[in-house]
Image (cartoon, grey):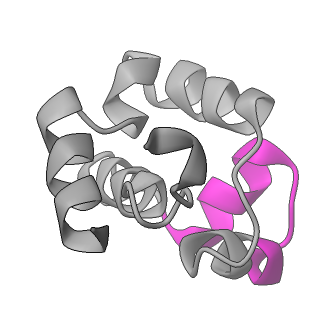
Amino acid sequence: MLSDMTESRIGIPDKVRGVAAEKGYTQERTALTIGISRTQLGERYAGRISFKADEILKLALAMRVPVERFFPKPEEIDAAEERVA
């Protein structure tokens, strides 16, 4: 069940990293965009700290992409749940 899954298991850090790379954002620029340090961004990419909703929104607005780009599709969630089970 999704409520038991961590952010990193459903791929939010990977989605953020992928969209950032696609848009030419360095780690420094990504961190500055959401108002955190590169170290804190690294913690989020590693799944040790969750991205906050406002951080995802800031990234979506700055990168001019739909916020949905940072979240897994239902079938990706199902696949992650099956791997955990």
Q: Is residue 25 left or right of residue 75?
A: right
| x and y, in percent, of residue 40 in the image | 81, 74
Q: Is residue 45 left or right of residue 78?
A: right
Q: As displayed, is residue 69 above or below residue 79?
A: above
Residues drawn in magenta? 26-40
| x and y, in percent, of residue 24 in the image | 35, 55
| x and y, in percent, of residue 58 in the image | 68, 28
Q: Is residue 82 left or right of residue 61?
A: left
Residue at 57% in and 81% down: 46
Residue at 12% in and 36% down: 75
Q: Is residue 10 magenta?
A: no
| x and y, in percent, of residue 51 in the image | 70, 50
Q: Quadrant of residue 81?
A: bottom left
Residue at 52% in and 25% down: 60
Q: Is residue 29 magenta?
A: yes
Q: As displayed, is residue 76 above or below residue 62?
A: below
